[in-house]
Amino acid sequence: MNSFQNSIPPEALPRTFREAIQVIQLLGIFYLWIDCLCIIQDDFEDWKIESDRMTTVYGNSSLNIAASGANHGGDGLFFTRNQVWQCQFTARNGQGLVLYNVASADLERGSLESMPLTLRGWAVQERILP
């Protein structure tokens, strides 16, 4: 744990984490929160402290990356999947221009809900709070 606090060698991370790092670097984002790296696993005291902060962590995030279709950290973010229609549009509201995401009903009510990540209870807050 001490050596990981100074530096984590990329080869020590599963594919999903490495790909998430690549995504944020390409987007120019400097910080990344990965629960199992930021919360000491199997340490109830650390979990208690960090779980109280989740509203702040996810509520103030700029971007939430979810490997919804991955069964485990080795699957990665990017893999062959069924094609899903999605688009974005910009509209004006009381605060100025806002970018809205539009997804098919299948994504919202069907395929997304059946993906492995949605079977984990903590993933609900990570989807809703950002």
Image: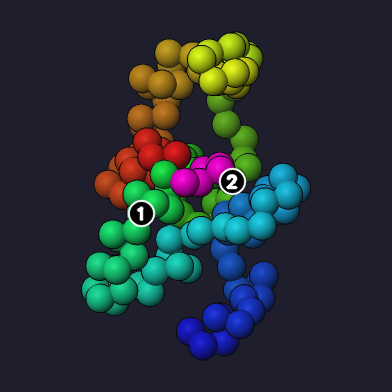
Residue 87 shows up from this direction:
no
Q: Nearer the viewer, residue 66 or 64?
A: 64
Are the residues tagged 2 and 1 within 8 Å (C-beta)?
Answer: no
- In the rendered image, which residue does mark 2 sit on? 77
Mark 1 secondary-structure assignment: helix
Query: What residue is disc 1 on?
Result: 54
Looking at the picture, does residue 12 appear above or below residue 88? below
Q: Tell me the residue at 34%/49% (across/down).
A: 55
* Left or right of 5 in this view: 115: left
Could you tell me which residue is drawn at 49 percent across and 59 percent down? 34
Labels 2, 1: front one: 1
* Residue 99 visible in rendering: yes
**Residue 12's spot in the image, x, y percent?**
60, 73
* Mark-to-mark CA distance, 2 and 1: 22 Å
Name the amino acid, label 2. Leu
What colouring does the structure picture have?
Answer: rainbow
Q: Per the image, is 61 magenta?
A: yes
- Please tell me which of labels 2 and 1 falls first in the chain: 1
Of 10 and 81, the residue lying toward us? 10
- Which stretch appears magenta? 60-64
Badge 1 amino acid: Met
Residue depicted at x 50% and y 46%: 61
Please give the name of the residue rendered at 62% of the width and 76% of the height, measured from the top-left corner: 8
Tell me the number on the disc at residue 5: none
- Magenta residue check for 22: no
